[in-house]
Image: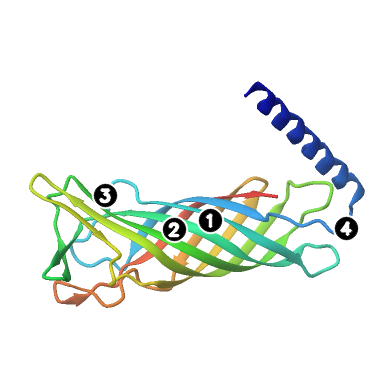
């Protein structure tokens, strides 16, 4: 184990040194912000009467974007990539399966009630930044559009008398479209994302169409 750790340390040191050496010799073809991670709160929009969120509904996204500058100073760029997102929506809508049909009601008697969504994402964005090759502390404004595919989901409702878990709910929107914006300087940047697609496709709550959608606000962190 000691030899393995020593070997890893030597490899890592050589890798970092080689990267630093490369930075000093390459001066015109640098790219910015190709790996990212977001931490956000999910503020559900288009709420029906009686709907509430409880505790914090969290959102986490990680991914890779290929930075493609298109002007000489490399301050403007396109970017496209692939990512994964996790959203945990804590709310008071009870989902249960009755005779192979999912039903939706407002129920505040729970100890735990959440809807967990896992998406694969395809983001596309246009970028402006006043970066230079020598410095990675710069202002940035990135705006984009993403298509997301829901590949796993779970709704959990627990109370003193019930313990319900619904997976692979066919009423959820499989494909989601969203716009987003990140603005900031250096490492931490404000992140906003607004979903253009409702969470559920064709669901009724109290005889009215359920049109919940997501609005995420938080921070995005970029890694070269």
- Mark with earlier residue (1, 2): 1
Rendered location of residue 94, percent (x, y): 18, 59
Identity of the residue furthest to the left in this view: 161
Q: Which of label 4 and label 2 is nearer to you?
A: 4
Q: Which of label 3 and label 4 is nearer to you?
A: 4
What residue do we see at 63% from left, 52% from top?
A: 184
Q: Tag on residue 144?
A: none
Q: CA distance from mark 1 to mark 2?
A: 8 Å
Q: Which of label 1 and label 4 is nearer to you?
A: 4
Q: Nearer the viewer, residue 97 or 107?
A: 97
What residue do we see at 81% from left, 56% from top?
A: 30
Rendered location of residue 108, percent (x, y): 14, 52
Instruction: Describe the element under mark 1 as helix, strand or loop.
Output: strand
- Mark with earlier residue (3, 4): 4
**Residue pointed to by mark 1:** 191
Instruction: Describe the element under mark 2 as helix, strand or loop.
Output: strand
Q: Nearer the viewer, residue 65 or 196?
A: 65
Q: Nearer the viewer, residue 12 or 90?
A: 12
Kindly indicate whether the residue at mark 2 contacts the one at mark 1 (C-beta within 8 angstroms): yes
**Residue pointed to by mark 3:** 54
**Residue pointed to by mark 4:** 28
Seen in the picture, residue 130 relative to 16 is either above or below; the reply is below
Kindly indicate whether the residue at mark 1 contacts the one at mark 3 (C-beta within 8 angstroms): no
Q: Tag on residue 216?
A: 2
């Amino acid at each position: 184990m000691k030899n393995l750790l020593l070997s890893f340390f030597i490899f890592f040191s050589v890798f970092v040194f080689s990267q630093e050496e490369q930075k000093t010799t390459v001066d015109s073809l640098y790219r910015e912000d190709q790996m990212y991670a977001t931490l956000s709160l999910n503020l559900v929009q288009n709420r029906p009467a009686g709907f509430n969120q409880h505790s914090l509904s969290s959102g986490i996204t990680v991914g890779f974007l290929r930075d493609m500058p298109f002007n000489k100073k490399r301050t403007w760029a396109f970017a496209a990539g692939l990512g994964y997102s996790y959203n945990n929506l804590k709310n008071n809508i009870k989902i249960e399966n009755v005779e192979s049909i999912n039903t939706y009601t407002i129920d505040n008697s729970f100890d735990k009630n959440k809807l967990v969504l896992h998406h694969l994402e395809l983001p596309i964005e246009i970028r402006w930044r006043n970066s230079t090759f020598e410095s990675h502390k710069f202002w940035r404004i990135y705006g984009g559009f993403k298509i997301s595919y829901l590949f796993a989901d779970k709704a959990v409702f627990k109370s003193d008398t019930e313990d319900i878990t619904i997976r692979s709910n066919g009423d959820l929107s499989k494909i989601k479209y969203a716009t987003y914006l990140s603005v900031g300087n250096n490492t931490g940047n404000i992140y906003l994302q607004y979903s253009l697609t409702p969470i559920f496709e064709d669901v009724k709550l109290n005889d009215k169409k359920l049109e919940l959608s997501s609005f995420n606000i938080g921070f995005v962190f970029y890694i070269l």
